[in-house]
Amino acid sequence: MQTNIINNKTIPNLQHDLLHVGLAFIFGILLLTVSSYISIPFFPVPLTLQTAAVLFLGMAFGWRMGVSTVSTYLLLGFIGTPVFAIGAFSPSIGYLLGFLPAVAICGIAADKELTRTIVGAAITGLIANVAIYVCGLSFLTIVLAGQHVLEFGLYPFVFGACLKVAFLALFMPLFWYRFLK
């Protein structure tokens, strides 16, 4: 059996890993799509579970796979595939673009094993949420001409964001414990 230079893995094992990576990639896109449709309508941007999915994918996949998955998801949405809750070119576009720095933050923290504790996952989730809100509010400021941006783009979402981060902070250490056994 041939040995592949990459990680001293045999070719069949490498193909098995590629299968797992491909399935994880598809799972990530499906998770993001489903989470976008689980929403509470707010004006001008709905409250969805996408942010939780983005943070989870970064913390679970690492930065390379996380950014690749979210980038592909965004590309699919921007070319017209119905993966977004209210369409690509809506007031939510800034939040969608904020998914990229958020998943990168979570992925880098995961690669450094910082998301394996409750505190590490919580801090990572909070920082990643700030990235999403900075991008989202920046674009929403343009859409709303600077008026009522925080009322419509931040305040209604803070409690939900805190719940999502708390859930991930409790879940991620269990996730890592299970998969590192």
Image (cartoon, helix red, strand yellow):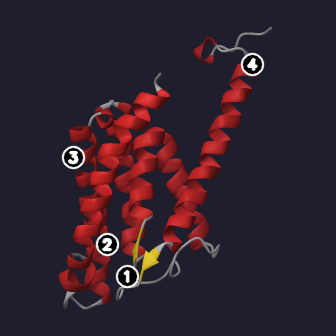
Give me the residue at 22% from left, 69% from top: 158
Among the 4 quarters of the image, the one containing residue 132: bottom left
Q: Which mark is residue 150?
A: none
Residue identified by numbered label 3: 123
Residue identified by numbered label 1: 45
Q: Earlier in the sequence, mark 2 or mark 1?
A: 1
Give me the residue at 69% from left, 24% from top: 14
Residue identified by numbered label 4: 11
The amino acid type, in three-letter code, at marker 2 is Gly
The amino acid type, in three-letter code, at marker 3 is Ile
Instruction: Give yes or no for contact between labels 4 and 1 (Cβ–Cβ under 8 Å).
Output: no
Q: Earlier in the sequence, mark 4 or mark 1?
A: 4
The residue sitting at the right extreme is 1
In space, the residues marked 4 and 1 are separated at their CA atoms by: 47 Å
Callout in the foreground (2, 1): 1
Residue identified by numbered label 2: 136
- Label 3: element kind: helix
Residue 38 lies, in percent from the top left, at 49, 72
- Label 4: element kind: helix
Q: Earlier in the sequence, mark 1 or mark 3?
A: 1
In space, the residues marked 4 and 3 are separated at their CA atoms by: 39 Å
Q: Earlier in the sequence, mark 3 or mark 2?
A: 3
